[in-house]
Image (cartoon, rainbow, N blue to C red):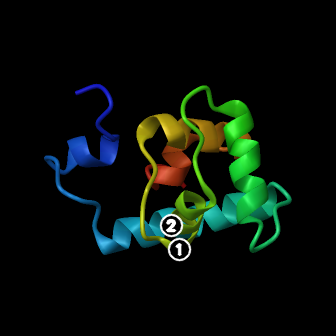
Amino acid sequence: MAGIPAYLRKTGGSVPSYQQRLNFRDRLHYALRNSGYRPNENTQLARDFNALHDGPPIGVASVHRWLSGDAIPSDDNLAILARLLEVSPAFLRGEIG
């Protein structure tokens, strides 16, 4: 099951619910504010993320989808995002307060 995001494993492979995506979006915005990012800094966030990421770069469109609640990143990308924002992946997933 490597490579399958935890939220898909937990739900039996189903797509995250609307509420799960909104919860992720809200926690991401909170972590961004506390890390000093301003709204609409999608390009800078993508650059900073890619500087920590060994895999293929993410685009600004991916960041936009995360920030709008349209998508939740894979576990690998979530771990990098959490490290960048100095929060835990569990916080971003909504597993802890």
Residue under circle 2? 65
The residue positioned 52% from the left and 40% from the top of the image is 77
Q: Amino acid at mark 2?
A: Arg
Residue 86 in view of the camera: no
Residue that lies at the very extreme toward the right in this rendered image: 36
Residue under circle 1? 68
Residue that lies at the very extreme toward the left in this rendered image: 12
Q: Residue 80 versus residue 44: which sits nearer the camera?
A: 44
Q: Position of residue 52 (x, y in %)?
A: 70, 32
Tag of residue 81: none
Of helix, strand and loop, which one carries label 2?
helix
Q: Position of residue 65 (x, y in %)?
A: 50, 66
Above or below, 5 relative to 62: above
Check whether the beta carbons of the residues at disc 1 and disc 2 lie within 8 A of each other. yes
Q: Is residue 51 left or right of residue 9?
A: right
Quarter of the picture containing the C terminus is bottom right
Q: Residue 23 versus residue 43: which sits nearer the camera?
A: 43
Residue 94 in view of the camera: yes
Query: CA–CA distance between discs 1 and 2?
Result: 5 Å
Q: Quadrant of residue 54?
A: top right
Q: Position of residue 74 (x, y in %)?
A: 42, 43
